[in-house]
């Protein structure tokens, strides 16, 4: 997924906040438990923000370089896109 893309969730996909503080991505086949950085990125997915803006926000929140966040999140979004979970 390109940094200029405006990711949004695929059909039947949504975030769920658990009582213990964890965040899960509910998908048609089940659920994925997210780590903190993935959860922070996916909380910003609404179809109005470009991926580059999501990466910058996560880099700032977790105090990592934009390059590092970009590598990790680009890989995450590519995998989710391949499964049809984000578009």
Image: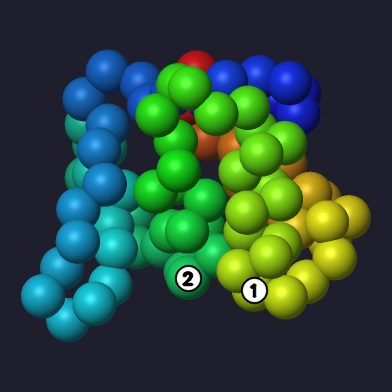
Q: Position of residue 52 (x, y in %)?
A: 72, 36
Residue at 44% x, 36% y is 45
Q: Position of residue 37 (x, y in %)?
A: 55, 65
Q: Which mark is residue 36?
A: 2
Label 2 crowd (10 A; few <14 / some 14-19 / many >=20): few
Residue at 48% x, 70% y is 36
Q: Position of residue 40 (x, y in %)?
A: 47, 59
Residue at 57% x, 20% y is 6
Question: Can you tell which of label 2 and label 1 is closer to the viewer?
Answer: 1
Quadrant, the N terminus = top right
Please give left or right for residue 78 compared with residue 34 in the image. right
Asked if 3 appears above or below 43 in the picture, the reply is above
Task: Evaluate if marks 2 and 1 touch, with contact meaning CB atoms under 8 Å apart.
Answer: yes
Label 1 crowd (10 A; few <14 / some 14-19 / many >=20): few
Quick one: 49 or 2, which is closer to the camera? Answer: 49
Residue 75 seen in render: no
Q: CA distance from mark 2 to mark 1?
A: 9 Å
Q: Which residue is mark 1?
A: 62
Please give left or right for residue 39 compared with residue 64 in the image. left
Please give left or right for residue 83 compared with residue 65 in the image. left
Comes first in the chain, label 2 or label 1: 2
Quick one: 33 or 8, which is closer to the camera? Answer: 8
Q: Position of residue 44 (x, y in %)?
A: 45, 43
Asked if 43 appears above or below 1 in the picture, the reply is below
Q: Secondary structure at mark 2?
A: helix
Q: In which image quadrant can residue 4 be found?
A: top right
Residue at 81% x, 51% y is 71
Quick one: 17 or 50, which is closer to the camera? Answer: 50
- Residue at the extreme left: 19
Asked if 19 appears above or below 65 in the picture, the reply is below
Q: Secondary structure at mark 1?
A: helix
């Amino acid at each position: 997924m390109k940094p200029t893309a405006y990711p949004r969730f695929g059909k039947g996909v949504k975030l769920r906040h658990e009582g213990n503080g964890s965040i899960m991505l509910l998908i048609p086949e089940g659920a994925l438990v997210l780590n903190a950085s993935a959860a922070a990125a996916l909380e910003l997915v609404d179809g109005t923000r470009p991926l580059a803006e999501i990466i910058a926000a996560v880099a700032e929140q977790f105090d990592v370089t934009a390059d590092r966040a970009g590598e990790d999140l680009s890989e995450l979004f590519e995998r989710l896109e391949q499964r049809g979970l984000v578009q």
